Image (cartoon, grey):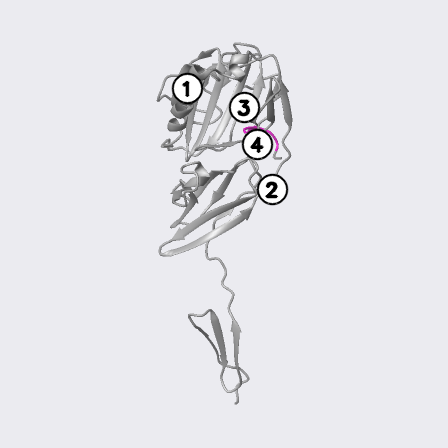
């Protein structure tokens, strides 16, 4: 009995053309459009100023350009994104970013990926009554500010805590209000400054400050010019948090802390007009919005 079936074979050439051969009938050639073989994905849409979470397949590695991490102004060299054994990673999206470019590798294969970034509208914020020397420091104070900034930048260079930072808690659950939001364009004593680097949680002096997620203390300074008594925690995989203007600290350098551990008390040290915690979260050197981690998604 004669079969009604056709024998079909596909032959792909090195020029991305597939020839479809149907036995005893006709030969059709058409262009083959390659589809990404990589499984890198994010858990949500990307928004500027957010700490994004994503996953990759086993064997995949991902990279950003060094200039993205403020290492070399125009450096195209690739810096690896730390990835857990089960393929999880965190990534900071800079404020005002419109696009994220990543390089993904698997074996000998390399692909450049681009993701759109949605932008937020950031507030303008006026702060008055600051001591003039804190707003426009003299040459000696500027040298100190620069040296302290280098110290803190160096503390963020290596993230070797083994935990992965998820399920954040508010470090000051007894805070009264957010007195200054992350990203606000700050005007100090009528002088324009950069966007606010963190979130200010206003609370009385002495209010307890707790670790919001597991980590290790990597920086401890009782008297930073701008931020006063300051603590920094490495939460692993490039994520750090810092705590400023504290009146007291209850940790030591290299101490491992768990979420909910007491690390200090709210104060008004450094450049501050009232008692509050200035809370900063970064992915390496990229500042992200702490409010995203403890409040409903934007």
**In front of the other: label 4 or label 2?**
2
Q: In the rendering, at what x and y percent does residue 188 appear?
A: 59, 19
Q: Which residues are magenta?
A: 290-296
Which quadrant holds residue 285?
top left
Mark carried by residue 168: none
Give the CA separation, mark 2 to mark 1: 37 Å
Label at residue 118: 2
Position of residue 141 in the picture relative to residue 169 (left or right): left
Q: Is residue 93 above or below residue 148?
A: below
Please state if 151 lies on the left or on the right of 275 as rendered: left
**Which residue is depicted at the point 60% across and 27% down?**
185
Q: Nearer the viewer, residue 138 or 197?
A: 138
Q: Earlier in the sequence, mark 4 or mark 2?
A: 2
Specify the quadrant that holds the C terminus. top right
Would you say the residues marked 2 and 1 are in contact, meaning their CB atoms lie under 8 Å apart? Answer: no
Provide the secondary structure element on which disc 4 rests. helix
Q: Secondary structure at mark 3?
A: loop
* Disc 2: CA contacts within 10 A as few (<14), some (14-19) or many (>=20): some
On residue 170, the disc is: 3
Kindly state the secondary structure of the residue where label 2 is placed. loop
Q: Earlier in the sequence, mark 2 or mark 1?
A: 2
| Looking at the image, residue 166 lies above or below residue 174 | below
Residue 200: in magenta span: no
- Give the labeled residue for mark 4: 292
Dot 4, how many residues are within 10 Å of its Cα: few (below 14), some (14-19), or many (20+)?
some
Q: Determine crowd level at label 3: few under 14, some 14-19, many 20+ residues with C-alpha closer than 10 A.
A: many
């Amino acid at each position: 009995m004669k079969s009604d079936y056709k024998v079909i074979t596909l032959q792909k050439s090195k020029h991305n053309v597939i020839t479809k051969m149907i036995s005893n009938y006709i030969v059709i050639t058409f262009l083959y459009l390659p589809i990404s073989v990589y499984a890198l994905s994010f858990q949500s849409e990307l928004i500027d100023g957010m700490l994004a979470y994503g996953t990759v397949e086993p064997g995949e590695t991902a990279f950003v350009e060094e200039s993205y991490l403020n290492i070399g102004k125009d450096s195209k060299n690739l810096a690896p994104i730390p990835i857990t054994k089960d393929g999880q990673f965190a990534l900071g999206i800079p404020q005002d970013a419109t696009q994220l470019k990543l390089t993904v590798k698997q074996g000998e294969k390399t692909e450049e990926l681009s993701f759109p970034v949605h932008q937020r509208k950031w507030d303008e914020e006026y702060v008055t009554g600051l001591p003039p020397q804190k707003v426009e420091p003299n040459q000696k104070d500027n040298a100190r500010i620069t040296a302290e900034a280098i110290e803190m930048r160096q503390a963020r260079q290596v993230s070797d805590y083994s935990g992965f930072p998820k399920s954040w808690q508010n470090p000051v659950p007894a805070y009264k209000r957010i007195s200054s939001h992350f990203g606000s364009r700050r005007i100090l004593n009528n002088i324009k400054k950069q966007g606010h680097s963190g979130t200010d949680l206003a609370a009385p002096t002495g209010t307890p400050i707790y670790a919001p997620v597991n980590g290790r203390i990597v920086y401890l300074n009782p008297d930073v010019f701008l931020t006063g008594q300051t603590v920094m925690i490495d939460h692993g995989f490039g994520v750090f948090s810092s705590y400023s203007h504290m009146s007291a600290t209850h940790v030591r350098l290299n101490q491992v802390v768990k979420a909910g551990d007491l690390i200090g008390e709210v104060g008004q040290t450094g450049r501050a007009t009232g008692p509050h915690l200035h809370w900063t979260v970064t992915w390496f050197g990229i500042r992200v919005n702490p409010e995203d981690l403890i409040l409903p998604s934007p």
